[in-house]
Image (tube, rainbow, N blue to C red):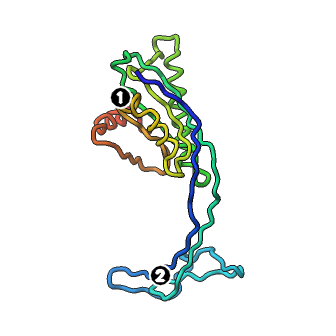
Amino acid sequence: TFQLTVSTYTFQLTVSTYSFNTHISTSSSNIHISGIAPQDFQGDCETDKNEKIKYYFGPSNLKLRLKTDNEFVVKKMWNVVAILKGSASVEDDHPIVVGNHRDAWVFGAADPNSGTASLLEMAATFALAARSPSKDTFYKPYHSIIFTSWSGEEFNLLGSTAFGELNDRDLFTRAQAYLNVDTAVGGKTLSVESSPSVKKAFKEAVQEVKSY
């Protein structure tokens, strides 16, 4: 058997301010390109005097000094976990974990919000099917499905790592698969990365999807 504990995780991130010098040089094979870059390569960086910076191809003797300023804070991070119990006995139950993170670097339309939307729809669909009074629409999986929404992913996978460390003996020694839906939608090309053991299951699932 296993028991899940959903807790508040607090992390302190310590990042130092640093600066470094680097030599800017660009080369391709044996061809060295120099001079001002074309207009399409020009960016929007400005000097401290609000003057546009010209972008050049290398090689160059210029040196770049980069400084980063970081805020030192302590924040709470929340994981949201929902479990759909399967029909298997406790001894035979090998859960499937489905997860995605909620935090994003910027707006997060594709990463992670497309995954969050897919995760919520998936959980809602399974929940409705498991509660359906009709035999035609009722469905309950044999193995339990654990839906997880992680926090703190962009800071170094903090939410999922903490969850895994807290539940490694009771859950992850029994779980048979983890499905990550980080970027569920983006572009027109389907791209999947997985362990070789689930290749057959993925191909069978794709064949069930109708194409229009």
CA–CA distance between discs 1 and 2? 51 Å
Q: Nearer the viewer, residue 172 or 131?
A: 172
Residue drawn at x 56%, y 37% as measured from the top left: 79
Instruction: Determine which residue is flagged by label 1.
Output: 174
| 97, above or below 85, in the image | below
Quadrant showing the C terminus: top left
Q: Residue furthest right?
A: 49
Residue drawn at x 53%, y 40% as measured from the top left: 150
- Give the percent coordinates (x, y) of residue 54: 59, 83
| 115, above or below 107, in the image | above
| Of callouts 1 and 2, the N-terminal one | 2
SS for tag 2? loop
Instruction: Determine which residue is flagged by label 2.
Output: 24
- Give the percent coordinates (x, y) of residue 151: 56, 43
Residue drawn at x 50%, y 11% as measured from the top left: 134
Q: Residues within 10 Å of mark 1 (few under 14, many from 20)?
A: some
Q: Where is residue 211, by image quadrant?
A: top left
Residue type, mark 2 in image: Ile
Residue type, mark 1 in image: Arg
Q: Residues within 10 Å of mark 2 (few under 14, many from 20)?
A: some
Residue 137 circle label: none
| 27, above or below 171, in the image | below
164 to the left or right of 198: right
- Give the percent coordinates (x, y) of residue 27: 39, 81
62 to the left or right of 91: right
Look at the numbered discs 1 and 2 and tell me whether their residues touch, using CB distance below 8 Å. Answer: no
